Amino acid sequence: MPTRTAKHPFRVRFGQVAILCLLPLLPAAVSAWLHPDRPPLNPDILAEGEVAWRTVSRWGDAALLVDARQPDAFAAGHIPGALSMPPDGFDAAVLTLLDQWTPEHRIVVYCDSRQCGASKALADRLRDELGLEPVYVLHGGWADWLAQNGKGDA
Amino acid sequence: MGAGNQTAAWSATGSSTRVLAARWLGHGLSILIGLLFMYAGVLKIGTPAAFLEDIEAYRIVSYLVAWGMAFYLPPFEILAGLALCVPAWRRSAAIILSALITVFLIALVSAWARGLSITCGCFGEAASSDNYGLLVLRDLLILGGLVVAWRTSRPPPSSPI
């Protein structure tokens, strides 16, 4: 009768570790493919109405930057030259914006990061309520700008 | 029964009670930590974009790596947490979760040292915190629990071929 050998415990454990590490790849791949909220694989892909910082930086003084974050976040740090226009302070900041705006300006609104919606909402408001054009949303917002440029103005 | 035999019997009983208590402690801790990891994974699996943002805030890995992690880590945490609750898989799960929590700890301390403003991202948006001391303490406690789970669990049974 042939003798039955046993698997070494180390081999069993190694197999289990491999399974635990490799098996999640399957749901991860399905999620990356089908998830409705999946972020783009290429961070430089711009959504409609968005503009990348490297483009804005080429515009120079023609870019009028508007910060849609809350005042405390603006006070902690913002893109140099940006005007604070939080959702609650729209009316108060409108006059300052119109003082600075000229038809040659391109308005660029930003909020915290790639996922925040405040900048898009403010851009829509500037177009719809004030009729300002063109108004862009800064791709990646403050987080991406900070990652690319380091410390902003406080 | 002689006095010497009685002492030996008591000693043996005490020793087996301690072993049993330690095993139950390890069992309870494993289930608790396993559920914790499963909870963390479930919270993040539905919001890859927000989790990606949390990973990027650490500024350690490239966007592409962070993108992959945002999809891979939640199911990994769920599966490993589940395995930690199963005695036959406990040691293997404890190994990889200890490695994972060690990486989290290094990332946290690194972000702390660089003065970054992060919200951990450990439990999605449900329990975000930027108190570095508490976050490090929590991870150290989880790591300690995983070590106890490892030490008190039996090695995996040898499988006959």
Image (cartoon, coloured by chain):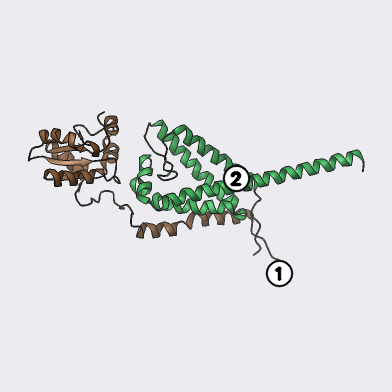
Chain colours: A brown, B green
Between A26 and B133, the one lying in front of the other is B133
Q: Residue at (27%, 33%) from the top-left corner?
A: A71
Residue B46 location (% of width, % of height): 39, 53
Q: Is residue A138 visible?
A: no
* Mark 2 residue crowding within 10 angstroms, few (<14) / some (14–19) / many (20+): some
Residue B86 location (% of width, % of height): 59, 54
Q: Which residue is mark 1?
A: A2
Residue B74 location (% of width, % of height): 44, 51
Q: Is residue A62 visible?
A: yes
Between B154 and A92, the one lying in front of the other is A92
Above or below, B24 relative to A24: above
Between A79 and A29, the one lying in front of the other is A79
Q: Specify the amino acid type for callout 2.
A: Leu
Q: Quadrant of residue A77?
A: top left
Above or below, B17 relative to A70: below
Q: Quadrant of the N terminus of chain B?
A: top right
Q: Which residue is mark 2?
A: B29
**Would residue A3 appear left or right of B87 to someone viewing this image?**
right
Q: Quadrant of the C terminus of chain B?
A: bottom right
**Would residue A73 appear left or right of B71 to someone viewing this image?**
left
